[in-house]
C-alpha cells in the first residue's frame, strides 16, 4: 500500500479505507474469541477493544457529525470504546477493559461492518469534502497505530501463558550474520526537522523548525542480542554507575536482569516471540528494552543515545524500507545491508529526547487536539518504526513516545557519539 499521506485527496480514499480496515480484522484471524477478550496489564488492551475503539473513532468523530439522519449502532459504545477523549465524554476505565465480556467479539465485528458500510456511503462522493477527508485520513493512521498495538498487546498476553503459545507460525526467527558496527559522521550545523508540506502528519510533528546540531556520529545498525549479552555478562545490571537513579530504582523494584521477553533456559537462552518460544539469535537486534536499559547499555559501550534531531537529520534522505509488519515476520531481523541500516523497521529506536512540543506548536482543534498534546510529559521520543509497524504509516518526522519503563513494545537501541 502507498503511504497513507498519498490518500490525503479524495481519489483512492475509499479503497484505502477498506484496505486498512480489512488489515485490522486479518490480524485477529489467528486468535480465539478468548484471546481477544483478555487484558494482560493496564497498559495493554484486549484485541476486541482495539477493534471497537478504532470503529468508535469513525462513528463518533465522522459519522455523528456528517451522516444524514445519524443513529448510533449502540449508544453504550460511546462510553465503552472511548479511550481518553474528555471533550467527547465519559470513558470506561482503561484498567477494566478486560472485564468487557459483553459485547461479544461477534457483536464488535458486526459493529465494524455496520460502520464500514456507512463510511463507504459517506466516501462515495465525486469530491469528498475536506472535513471528511481530513478526519478519515487521521482515523486510518490512528487505526494503523492500533494494528501495531494489537500485535504487541497480544504478544504480552500470550507470553504469560505457561503453554507459551504462538500467535502465528509466520513469526519464527530468521537468522543471519550482521555487518560489523560502523560509525557514520554527520557535520551537524543548523538543520530543519519536523513535518513540512501539505501531506498528512500528526500535530506533534509540527511546525518544521531549525535546530543547531554539533558534529556527531551514528552507529550503522541496531545493537544485537549478542552485544547485549556481553553487557549482561560484564555485570551491566549490577553496576550502579551505568544507570540513571530512576533506572536503578526500577531494577531494584522489579528485579530486572535481562530484556523483557528473554528466557534464561539453560543451557541456551531463549526469547518469547509472536511465533512462540525461540532460541535467542545473537545476530538479531535486541528488542523490548526500556529507556533505562538502553541508556545504561550506551554508557557501558562508551556511547550515548541519539537525540531525535540527530536521528531525523540522518534519516531524512534515506529510503523508507525495512522489516515492517507487511513482511509478516513480526520479529526483527539481523542487519545484512551495508551502510546506515535499520533506520526504518525492525525496532523503534529510543532517543534521549524528552517528548515535548516543538517551538510554536499548536494542538489540532477540537477533540482530536487531545490525541498528542496532553501526553507531552514524562515520556521519551522513539523513531523509525518496528517489525509490527505498517510501512505505509512511516515517515522521517514521525514521533512515537513512551515512558521510560515501557518495554512491551518493539523498542531497541541505536548508539550515537559526539564527534571530536
Image: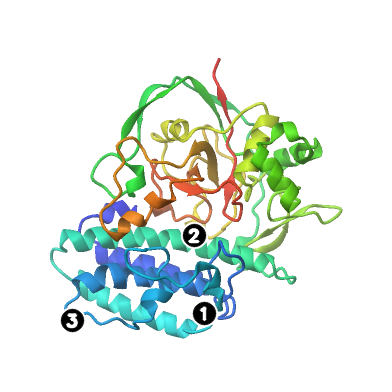
Dot 1 corresponds to which residue? 100
Give the residue displayed 62% in from the left and 46% down from the top. Answer: 290
User: Looking at the picture, how far across and down is residue 313, in whole percent?
Assistant: 42, 31
Dot 2 corresponds to which residue? 148
User: Looking at the picture, how far across and down is residue 310, in whole percent?
Assistant: 46, 30
Are circles 1 and 2 on residues that touch, CB within 8 Å? no
Dot 3 corresponds to which residue? 69
Can residue 280 be seen at all in this image of the molecule? no
Q: Quadrant of the C terminus?
A: top right
Q: Which mark is residue 270?
A: none
Residue nearer the viewer, 109 or 352: 352
Mark 1 to mark 2 CA distance (whole Å): 21 Å
Dot 1: what SS?
loop
243 relative to 397 in the view: left or right: right
Badge 3 or badge 2: first in the primary sequence: 3
Badge 1 or badge 2: first in the primary sequence: 1
The residue mark sitting in front, 3 or 2, is 3
Can residue 389 be seen at all in this image of the molecule? yes
Question: For mark 2, does the 10 Å Cα neighbourhood hold few (<14), some (14 to 19), or many (20 or more) residues?
Answer: many
Are circles 3 and 2 on residues that touch, CB within 8 Å? no
Dot 3: what SS?
loop
State which quadrant residue 222 falls in. top right
User: Looking at the picture, how far across and down is residue 265, in whole percent?
Assistant: 82, 56
Residue nearer the viewer, 138 or 316: 138
Badge 1 or badge 3: first in the primary sequence: 3
Amino acid at each position: 500500500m502507498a503511504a497513507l499521506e498519498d490518500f490525503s485527496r479524495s481519489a483512492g480514499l475509499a479503497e484505502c479505507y477498506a484496505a486498512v480496515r480489512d488489515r485490522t480484522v486479518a490480524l485477529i484471524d489467528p486468535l480465539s474469541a478468548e484471546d481477544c477478550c483478555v487484558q494482560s496489564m493496564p497498559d495493554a488492551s484486549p484485541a476486541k477493544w482495539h477493534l471497537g475503539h478504532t470503529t468508535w473513532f469513525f462513528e463518533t468523530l465522522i459519522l455523528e457529525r456528517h451522516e444524514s439522519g445519524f443513529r448510533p449502532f449502540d449508544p453504550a459504545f460511546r462510553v465503552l470504546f472511548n479511550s481518553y477523549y474528555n471533550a467527547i465524554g465519559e470513558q470506561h476505565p482503561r484498567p477494566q477493559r478486560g472485564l468487557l465480556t459483553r459485547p461479544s467479539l461477534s457483536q464488535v465485528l458486526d459493529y465494524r461492518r455496520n460502520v464500514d458500510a456507512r463510511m463507504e456511503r459517506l466516501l462515495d462522493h465525486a469530491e469528498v469534502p475536506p472535513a471528511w477527508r481530513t478526519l478519515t485520513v487521521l482515523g486510518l493512521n490512528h487505526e494503523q497505530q492500533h494494528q501495531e498495538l494489537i500485535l504487541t498487546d497480544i504478544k504480552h498476553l500470550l507470553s504469560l501463558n505457561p503453554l507459551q503459545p504462538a500467535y502465528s507460525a509466520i513469526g519464527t526467527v530468521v537468522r543471519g550474520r550482521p555487518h560489523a558496527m560502523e560509525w557514520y559522521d554527520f557535520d551537524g550545523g543548523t538543520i530543519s526537522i519536523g513535518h513540512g508540506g501539505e501531506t498528512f502528519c500528526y500535530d506533534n510533528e509540527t511546525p518544521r523548525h531549525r535546530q543547531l546540531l554539533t558534529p556527531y556520529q551514528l552507529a550503522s545498525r541496531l545493537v544485537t542480542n549478542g552485544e547485549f549479552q556481553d553487557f549482561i555478562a560484564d555485570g551491566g545490571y549490577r553496576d550502579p554507575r551505568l544507570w540513571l537513579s530512576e533506572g536503578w530504582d526500577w531494577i531494584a523494584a522489579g528485579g530486572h536482569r535481562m530484556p523483557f521477553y528473554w528466557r534464561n533456559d539453560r543451557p541456551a537462552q531463549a526469547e518469547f516471540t509472536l511465533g512462540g518460544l525461540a532460541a535467542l539469535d545473537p545476530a538479531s537486534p535486541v528488542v523490548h528494552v526500556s529507556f533505562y536499559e538502553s541508556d545504561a547499555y550506551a554508557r557501558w559501550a562508551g556511547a550515548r543515545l541519539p537525540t531525535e534531531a540527530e536521528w531525523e537529520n540522518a534519516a531524512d534522505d534515506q529510503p523508507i524500507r525495512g522489516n515492517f509488519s507487511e513482511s509478516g515476520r513480526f520479529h526483527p531481523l539481523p542487519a545484512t545491508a551495508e551502510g546506515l541500516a535499520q533506520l526504518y523497521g525492525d525496532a523503534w529506536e529510543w532517543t534521549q529526547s524528552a517528548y515535548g512540543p516543538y517551538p510554536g506548536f499548536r494542538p489540532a482543534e477540537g477533540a482530536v487536539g487531545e490525541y498528542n498534546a496532553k501526553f507531552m510529559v514524562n515520556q521519551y521520543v522513539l523513531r523509525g518504526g518496528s517489525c509490527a509497524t505498517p510501512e505505509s504509516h512511516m515517515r522521517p518526522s514521525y514521533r512515537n513516545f513512551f515512558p521510560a519503563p515501557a518495554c512491551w513494545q518493539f523498542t531497541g537501541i541505536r548508539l550515537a557519539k559526539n564527534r571530536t
